[in-house]
Amino acid sequence: MLHRGALYLLIVALALLASPGLTPPVAAQFTYVIDDDLQNCVDGNLPHYSTITQAVAVAVAGDTIRVCEGDYPEPSMVITTDYLTITGPGATLGDDGVATVHHNGVFSAMFTIRADYVVVQGLDLDATPLGGASSTIGFEIQGNGVDGVEIGHNEIRNATGTAVSASGGTSNVRIVSNNIHDSQDAVVCFYSDDCVVAGNTVNVTDRALEIVGDGANVTNNVFVNGRVVASGDNLFISTNQMTGAGPGVGFLLAVRGNYVSVVDNTLSDSTGSGIEVSPGGGSVTIARNTFTRIAKPIVLSSWGPINLAATIGGSQPEANTFVDSGGTLGDANYLVEMNGPTANVNAEYNKWGLCGLDAIEAEIYHQVDNSTSALVDFDPFIAPGGCSATPTPTPMPTLTPTATATPTPGGTRAVTIPAGSWANFAWTGDSSPQTVADCFGAGKVAAMYRLDAASQSFQRWIGGREELSNMGEVQRYDALLALNASAQPATCEMPDPSPVSPRTLTIPAGRWANFAWTGGTSAQDVADCFGEGKIAAMYRLDAASRSFQRWIRGREGLSTMGDVAQFDALLALNASDQPATCEMPGG
């Protein structure tokens, strides 16, 4: 099955191949050959003219103007002929030289296009003003209803204004595979719908790209220094490289609108923002992007009656990756910054580059820091490989094992959590989560989780973060996952409830459960207690080896779990399609 991003790109490609701009509905008519010195340059045919302007003046719909290697100081040209193609050496794979067109007019634009399905490709445009123009533009596409113009495979340089501009109600303009540099602005599609900007290399001093219009597709470009701005509905911004916004430019990419997708981009080296979602409402998906050395990778802003709906990552395949970004812990730069009453943000399963929930919390500015903003949900997350513990436990055998409870005389039992580690243990009192955490020493336990077998979700308690905590009272024999975030072992002397009365436990069909065993027997007997054949696997954390002991039904060669002691915390999978109930022994 195609990934949805790949499928979208495939649909776009097919639509472009079917567009009239690539297959004009008028028959090709005549090819004019242009050479600055009127020498033989194409297929043994003598040139017709020495300037492009001369050919533009006589061409009709369907004609082609072939420009040979040379220098062409041209006045400002206005194209009003539909289905006209102007092609230079840069449009071919062979070494045909360079056709350089110089700005020798008194008006700003070198080419003004006011016709449908015009193609200009393979030229070298030097927009340095030779004829007295105060501001220079490479291509200006204008006129309400002008459709299907393509500007491709050109080099455009030294524009004191904009290299390529489409405005005034144009549509389906394609700006592809150009090299635009040493100019103020590169590409502007202003009030132009369905603009395609793809495969360009851009290095300018101000705007790399600005789009105001619906349905734009911005893919596979390399943007250096200039900023990218896109405003409209149904925008797709994918697989671009955006690097180092120039002086005074506060962001690499700013977007605004409904159904905006920003995916698979690489953003790097900015002292400002990576992606800014501008105010005004809308829905934005930010997925599979990589942020490297960005001071503020993502800034979400909204005010007024319409809230912004944003998803950042949201699942493991959609994870964004953050590398050396967000400044340092505790400074004014955040990985995600919320400004205004945006809707709550799903930012789960991202690779923040941090090992713990507290560190991530410090790098996200949201409702916890400003009550007027919404909440960012960043748990669970994907930890980097160098972390000593897995900060987001899931009902699967991937947690770093820690000590199991060991009984001590005198009516109490001790549980010790090693420094900087997680423990999965049975609580044998009845109290609040705060009391459980304090039992291990003030401030040592930073977070605790309890698995709800019915919903397969974790209830959480985060130290000092009541607004993020949803764990209720801790009952006797609840199995808890707790993080000792301190640099010292944390020990709790909890009540010993012995003797223990028999108790009933049910694991829903097809679900994991994390529970405390209150008897003392073999792993096989524990599994069989839930019904023959229902429990497929069980896991227990072992402190000595720092690995999971496992029991796999019918696979003695894979099973490493010995006898199960009283109060051991077990993680078990009911693989059947029926609830599994155990009348657990006491003792």
Image (cartoon, rainbow, N blue to C red):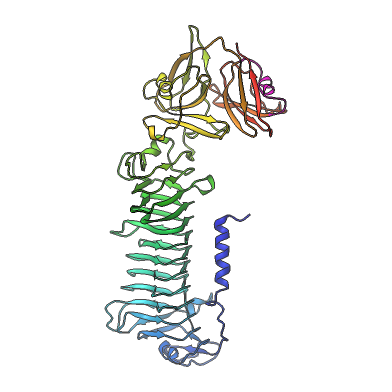
Residue ID at (41%, 35%): 468
Whether residue 147 is visible to the viewer of this picture, yes or no, is yes
- Residue 201 is left or right of residue 575, and the answer is left
- Residue 525 is left or right of residue 38, and the answer is right
Q: Quadrant of residue 520?
A: top right
x%, y% of residue 330? 31, 39
Magenta segment:
519-534
Q: Quadrant of residue 493?
A: top left
Residue 98 located within the stretch drawn in magenta: no
- Residue 186 is left or right of residue 349, and the answer is left
x%, y% of residue 481? 50, 27
In the image, residue 582 above or below residue 77: above
Residue 529 located within the stretch drawn in magenta: yes
x%, y% of residue 496? 50, 12
Q: Closest to the observer: 378 or 107?
A: 378
x%, y% of residue 189? 40, 70
In the image, residue 256 above or below residue 521: below
Residue ID at (54%, 47%): 317
Q: Closest to the observer: 474 or 312?
A: 474
Whether residue 549 is visible to the viewer of this picture, yes or no, is no
